[in-house]
Image (tube, rainbow, N blue to C red):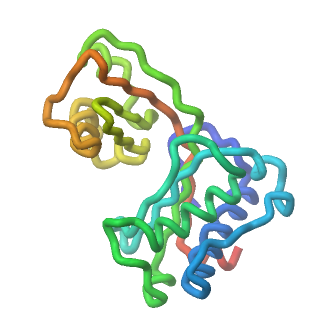
Amino acid sequence: MSSTETEDVYRVEERRMLLGIAAQSIEHGLNHGRPLEPDPHDYPTALQAERATFVTLQIDGALRGCIGVLEAIRPLVIDVARNAYGAAFEDPRFPPLTRAELPRLDVHISVLSPSEPMHFRSESDLLEQIRPGIDGLILEDRGRRGTFLPSVWEDLPNAADFLEHLRHKAGLPSGYWSETLAVSRYSTESFGAPIAETFSG
């Protein structure tokens, strides 16, 4: 079971519970066509709190789905269950997950801190403030928005490249800059495991 990005908040057993919920919700989706609906009161207090998450699925190291939210709107266990289902069956970049793919999945959960706006005078000022390997960024302007989780630094370790690719994701032109550009950052506590390990506990 791997961990990256920030100081740990959740105990090992709580992480295993969350990974188990994600796996069960995916299996529930295969069987019933809808996400698992866990009762938050069945879980430790830390997992009942409203938190925002992303669930990322991989097969053989390649992305197989990623769905999440940027703002905390529901209990953590429910957010994980819904986003795991969404990553498996509702990511528009991929066809719905098949039963044959289930045993090959790696499941990764990122629990987001509340985002905070960044204050900067220019692009160079913004780039100096960005913390590679730590910051997830939300970029917004002209009615468009995009985000990259901190895990994206593994593929884009340079801050300028990270920002440029985030522009593209938000649907903005290369090198785009304006006085109304808004950037917020957040951190994550991230952990994952092969799906077989989540079922076995």
Image location of residue 29, percent across then percent down: 57, 79
Q: Going by the image, does 6 lie left or right of 170?
A: right
Residue found at x 43% / y 42%: 150
Q: Is residue 92 above or below residue 104?
A: above
Q: Going by the image, does 43 lie left or right of 32?
A: right
Image location of residue 96, percent across then percent down: 41, 78
Image location of residue 131, percent across then percent down: 40, 27
Residue nearest the observer in this picture, 88 or 131:
88
Q: Going by the image, does 183 lie left or right of 39?
A: left
Q: Is residue 160 above or below residue 27?
A: above
Image location of residue 65, percent across then percent down: 41, 66
Number of marks drawn: 0
Residue found at x 67% / y 69%: 20
**Image quadrant where one finds the N terminus:** bottom right
* Furthest residue in direction left, as rendered: 174
Q: Is residue 116 above or below residue 42?
A: above
**Image quadrant where one finds the C terminus:** bottom right
